[in-house]
Image (tube, helix red, strand yellow):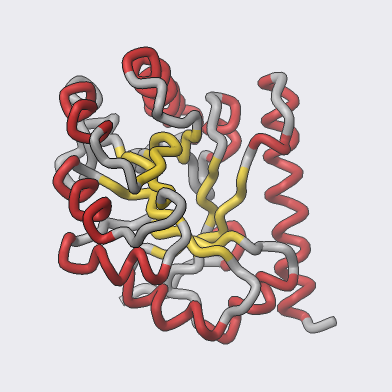
Amino acid sequence: MTDELALFQRARQEVLGRIADACARAGRSPAEVTLVAVSKTVPPERVPSAVEAGFTVLGENRVQEGEEKRPQVPGATWHLIGPLQSNKARRALETFSVIQSVHDADLAVRLNRLCDAGPPYPVLLQVNVDHDPSKAGFAPETILDAVETLDSLDRLEFRGLMTIGHAVARPDDARPTFAALRAVGDRLRGQWPRLGSELSMGMSDDYPIAVEEGATIVRIGRAIFGERPTG
């Protein structure tokens, strides 16, 4: 066993243990939570060891980086978790199994138009819960206005919602954001049962809080791969 593989195995044990503890506090099963290992900026040669260690669902922020890594990393499922420009929509559909960052109705319409015939393509709707001007996403108070348009898109499977929280001083300070996304989901499904129950929220600093608040997908980078390069 290589040192790198052992490192990833320890990281996976630690992260899954913290997810299990959070689930126990919330009266949930750990089987309800999908771990997405965020490999953005990680050199492609490191990622196969992570997959071997059990991190088989990988997340990328950029379409181009996913395109470059996917052929080099067999055995993984890829999620796009970063912003998607409409001119890269077709490439994203060809590269990723799930797009978590559908930030408005126009992008959803474009993806639906580009989808090939076959099973509906799974997406999550990104909600800007905190009204952060630096982040994309549906406004939580107006997302219902998009339902008529979204419901007409038969080539997409709307699995649920995603949010990117703002930076906080303490992990527990993120709790209102996560609780708010859960509330948006509950309200939206009451009007639009087609929306699935997935809630993608929580990252390395605060994912146990997200799990306590109902996250079904957590997106973990630094706690698995270490600090990102800067500059």
Res. 106 visible in picture: yes
Q: Is residue 100 left or right of residue 76?
A: left
Asked if residue 47 is positioned above or below residue 177 in the image, the reply reads: below
Who is closer to the viewer here, 90 or 69?
90
Who is closer to the viewer here, 215 or 151?
151
Res. 135 visible in picture: no
Extreme-front residue of the structure: 117
Residue 45: x percent and y percent? 57, 86
Q: In this view, does 23 lie to the left or right of 162?
A: right
Who is closer to the viewer here, 88 or 112?
112
Residue 198: x percent and y percent? 49, 35
* Residue 103 figure quarter: top left
Q: In this view, does 85 lie to the left or right of 39?
A: left
Residue 91: x percent and y percent? 30, 71
Who is closer to the viewer here, 208 or 58?
58
Asked if residue 37 is positioned above or below residue 45 in the image, the reply reads: above
The quadrant the N terminus occupies is: bottom right
The quadrant the C terminus occupies is: bottom left
Image mark count: 0
Q: Who's the residue at 66% across and 71% down the image? A: 50
Q: Who's the residue at 77% across and 65% down the image? A: 9
Residue 98: x percent and y percent? 44, 55
Q: Who's the residue at 31% across and 59% down the image? A: 115
